[in-house]
Image: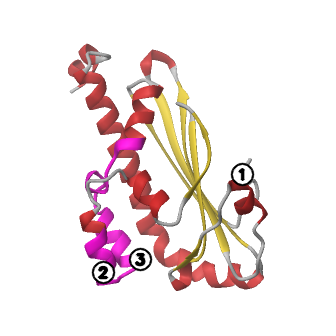
Amino acid sequence: DIMPAYHFHEFHATRVHATPERITRALHEVTPSEIRLFSLLTWLRSPSLRGLRERAARAERPILTIMTGGGFMPLAEEPDREIVLGTIGRFWADSTLRVATPGEFLAFDRPNWAKAAINFRIENEAGGWCRVTTETRIVGTDDDARRRFAPYWRVIYPGSALIRATWLDAVKRRAERTAIGAGAFGESRRRET
């Protein structure tokens, strides 16, 4: 609903053997150090030594907390079902722009900018499993922004896709570890491993 039309996107999914509540908690608790190659890949995308030191210092803070403190804003949340964050930037020039409300994000249309939205969605499946997906959508506010973003996207997409896939892996590990520690699903998980 927030960004039905877009110019660039990526989509990733995994199955998690945990309740939606545990998965939501894991989404809110996963730190950059749990996401393989996160620091390296984000540094390659925006290579400033100061930024690397800052990222290292924040490595044990939850990634969603870091994102909302660093340019992303919460756009929507349906508890235990979906989280949506957004940002506006000239990403090809390592520049972001803050807006105050989700309404301002939706209405923003100044030329030569791009808007990006990322979501995490949890869908119940049978047998105590959930399907967890993440999708990133980007829309350029005009033709110039789309032209500038396209080569940037081609360069960063492989790393971005790897971050998203390993982010879901980190959520899965944390949610299933929490579920086993609490006894939920414990016997079936022990038999699987």
Q: Which residue is mark 3?
A: 45
Horizontal arrangement in the rendering, residue 98 relative to residue 139 (left or right): left
Residue at 77% from the left image edge and 78% from the top image edge? 142
Residue at 36% from the left image edge and 77% from the top image edge? 44
- State the mark number for residue 50: 2
Q: Which residues are magenta?
A: 28-54
Comparing labels 1 and 2, the label whose residue is closer to the camera: 2
Rendered view: 193 above or below 96: above
Query: Does the magenta-highlighted stretch encompass residue 174?
Result: no
Horizontal arrangement in the rendering, residue 108 relative to residue 20 (left or right): right
What crowding class fits label 1: few (fewer than 14 Cα within 10 Å), some (14-19), or many (20 or more)?
some
Instruction: Return the x and y of residue 21 as percentages of the image width and height.
Output: 45, 27
Label 3 or label 2, whichever comes before in sequence order: 3
Label 3 or label 1, whichever comes before in sequence order: 1
Q: As shown in the figure, which amino acid type bears the numbered disc 3? A: Arg
Q: As shown in the figure, which amino acid type bears the numbered disc 1? A: Ile
Rendered view: 63 above or below 152: above
The secondary structure that dominates the magenta segment is helix
**What separation in Å lies between label 3 and label 1 (alpha carbons)?**
26 Å
Residue at 43% from the left image edge and 23% from the top image edge? 19
Q: Which residue is mark 1?
A: 2
Rendered view: 27 above or below 8: above
In this view of the protein, which residue sits in the foreground, 98 or 118? Answer: 98
Horizontal arrangement in the rendering, residue 172 relative to residue 111 (left or right): left
Instruction: Return the x and y of residue 79 as percentages of the image width and height.
Output: 56, 32
Where disc 3 sits, the SS reads helix
- State the mark number for residue 86: none
Residue at 21% from the left image edge and 27% from the top image edge? 193
